[in-house]
């Protein structure tokens, strides 16, 4: 049981490039989410999904796209990277939505130059 | 949306002393309040949570108290140990699917 896995661990992009951050979980959780963590700002919700085919915006969705084609996977796409998207990104999953324990992945550190 | 404020931002205590971290929230619809611990280079991990129908919850050296009238909740760690050193985040959940996190408290336990 690997829990929540994220790839890559580190990534450097140039402004304007696109990329996809991968997230997978093997706990059969319906709820998955993406956060970004910036110094002094805690974790802020980008997008979340309550099941395959269902996604919704969080607090800071601009510049990011998501889709959920399977229960296991929830990729986060940066369409045109900007320096303001330099951050640490965490994927999380939970059994029953936001009012249950969230299991976080190890994070992806993204730098946009 | 919900606004969660967390204090202090940094906290240093001697080993064996107690540590208290406080959070306030703004949305009275919030009814689930978890606390997460984040060690360096890792993702946050749940250490304790409380729901609005309960005023206090304990788990060994860790306790959380909730005052819904005043809209604040606190984390109490007793008999602190060096391995308690980490960043702690509180959170509130007003809608069922969206968490709002505090800005974090960096706790250092001095041996």
Image (cartoon, helix red, strand yellow):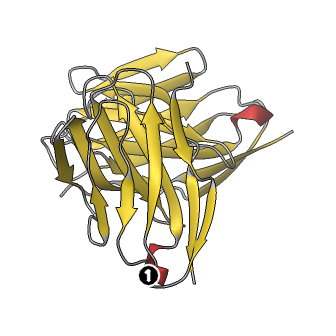
The answer to whether residue B46 is left or right of residue B33 is right
Q: Which residue is mark 1?
A: A82
| Crowding near the residue tagged with mark 1, few <14, some 14–19, many ≥20 C-alpha atoms within 10 Å | some
| Residue A26 in the image, given as x and y percentages of width and height | 45, 24
Between residues B11 and A75, which one lies in front from this camera angle? A75
- B63 or B3: which is nearer to us? B3
Residue B45 visible from this viewpoint:
no
Give the residue displayed 26% in from the left and 39% down from the top.
A69
Going by the image, does B5 lie left or right of B10? left
Q: How many marks?
A: 1
Residue extending furthest right? B111
Query: Which residue sits at x=40%, y=19%?
Result: B57
What is the x, y in percent for residue A112? 54, 78
Where's the C terminus of chain B, which quadrant? top right
To which chain does the residue with label 1 belong?
A
Please provide percent x and percent y for residue A35.
40, 53
| Residue at position x 22%, y 27% in the image | B52
B63 over B75 or under it: above or below: above
């Amino acid at each position: 049981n690997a829990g929540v896995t994220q790839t890559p661990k580190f990534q450097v992009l140039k402004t304007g490039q696109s990329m996809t951050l991968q997230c997978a979980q093997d706990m059969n959780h319906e709820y998955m989410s993406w956060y970004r963590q910036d110094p002094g700002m805690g974790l802020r919700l980008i997008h979340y999904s309550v099941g395959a085919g269902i996604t919704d915006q969080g607090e800071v969705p601009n510049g990011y796209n998501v889709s959920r084609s399977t229960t296991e996977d929830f990729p986060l796409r940066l369409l045109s990277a900007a320096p303001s998207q330099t951050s640490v990104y965490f994927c999380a999953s939970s059994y029953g939505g936001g009012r249950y324990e969230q299991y976080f992945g190890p994070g992806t550190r993204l730098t946009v130059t | 949306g919900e606004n969660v404020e967390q204090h202090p931002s940094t906290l240093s205590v001697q080993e064996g002393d107690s540590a208290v971290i406080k959070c306030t929230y703004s949305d009275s619809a919030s009814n689930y309040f978890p606390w997460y611990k984040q060690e360096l280079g890792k993702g946050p991990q749940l250490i304790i949570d409380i729901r609005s129908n309960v005023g206090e919850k304990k788990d060994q050296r860790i306790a959380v108290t909730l005052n819904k009238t005043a809209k604040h909740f606190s984390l109490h760690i007793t008999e602190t140990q060096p391995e308690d050193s980490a960043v702690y985040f509180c959170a509130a959940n007003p809608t069922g699917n969206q968490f709002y996190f505090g800005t974090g408290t960096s706790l250092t336990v001095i041996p």
